[in-house]
Image (cartoon, rainbow, N blue to C red):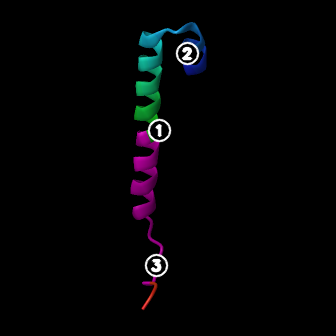
Amino acid sequence: MIKKSLDENNIETIDYWTKKLSYHLSSHILHTIFWTNLTNKKSEPKGE
């Protein structure tokens, strides 16, 4: 939809879809970090 809107020079639609994309992508990344940190896997410190 973003590519199509760019081709049609439809700024309102570009704005709408880029905001939706950024919202959903950031939500996915934050949820991935959150659930990864809640795992019960033992991890040892690395380095000196």
Alpha-carbon distance for marks 2 and 3? 48 Å
Location of mark 1 (residue): 25
Label 3 near label 2: C-beta < 8 Å?
A: no
* Up-down relation of residue 44 to residue 35 (above or below): below
> Which quarter of the figure is the C terminus placed in?
bottom left
Residue farthest to the bottom?
48
In this rendering, the label closer to the viewer, 2 or 3: 2
Amino acid type for the residue under numbered disc 2: Leu
The residue wearing badge 3 is: 42
Which residue is rendered at x = 45% and y = 60% of the image?
A: 36
The numbered dot on residue 6 is 2
Which badge, 3 or 1, is on the more N-terminal residue?
1
Tell me the magenta residue range: 26-45
Percent of width and height locating residue 37: 40, 63
Give the residue type at disc 1: Leu
Magenta stretch holds residue 28 = yes
Q: Position of residue 45 (x, y in %)?
A: 42, 84
The secondary structure making up most of the magenta span is: helix
Q: What is the distance, in whole Å, between disc 1 and disc 2 at their CAs?
A: 20 Å
Label whose residue precedes the other's in the sequence (2 or 3): 2
Give me the residue at 57% from left, 17% from top: 1
Image height of 25 relative to 3, above or below: below
Dot 2 lies on which element?
A: helix
**Discs 3/1, front:** 1
* Rendered location of residue 43, percent (x, y): 46, 79
Q: Secondary structure at mark 1?
A: helix
Which mark is in front, 1 or 2? 2
Check whether the beta carbons of the residues at disc 1 and disc 2 lie within 8 A of each other.
Answer: no
Quarter of the image for residue 34 reads: bottom left
